Amino acid sequence: MRRLEVLDTDGGVWLLPDAVELWPSTPSMIFRLLTSLLPRDHELAHDA
């Protein structure tokens, strides 16, 4: 299972890698992480 937790505040964007820590982030990093959640080719059903 893939998951991504992000907190967007007036002070910036923060990654929540687990329930204990906050990591400062950027919108670009969040976008890259969001796209990494998409299924890979081998995870998609292929109709031949």
Image (cartoon, rainbow, N blue to C red):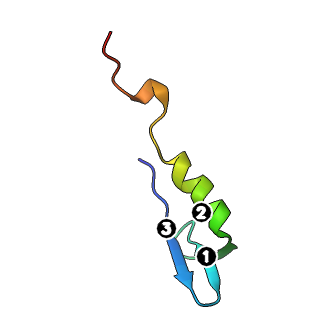
Locate residue 38, reporting x and y percent. Answer: 46, 44
The residue at 59%/90% (across/down) is 10
Q: Which residue is mark 2?
A: 30
The residue at 66%/61% (across/down) is 29
- Asked whether residue 37 appears in the rendered view, the answer is yes
Q: Which residue is mark 1?
A: 14
Which sits earlier in the primary sequence, circle 3 or circle 2? 3
Of 46 and 19, the residue lying toward us: 46
Label 1 element class: strand
Which sits earlier in the primary sequence, circle 3 or circle 1? 3
Label 3 with label 2: CB-CB less than 8 Å: no
What's the residue type where badge 1 is placed?
Trp
Locate residue 31, reporting x and y percent. Answer: 58, 58
Number of numbered discs overlaid on the protein picture: 3
Residue 48 located left or right of residue 25: left
**What distance separates the C-alpha of mark 3 from that of mark 2?**
10 Å
Task: Work out whether 34 lies above or below 11.
Answer: above
Label 3 element class: loop
**What distance separates the C-alpha of mark 2 from that of mark 1?**
9 Å
What's the residue type where badge 2 is placed?
Ile
Asked which quadrant contains residue 23, the reply is bottom right
The residue at 30%/15% (across/down) is 47
What's the residue type where badge 3 is placed?
Glu
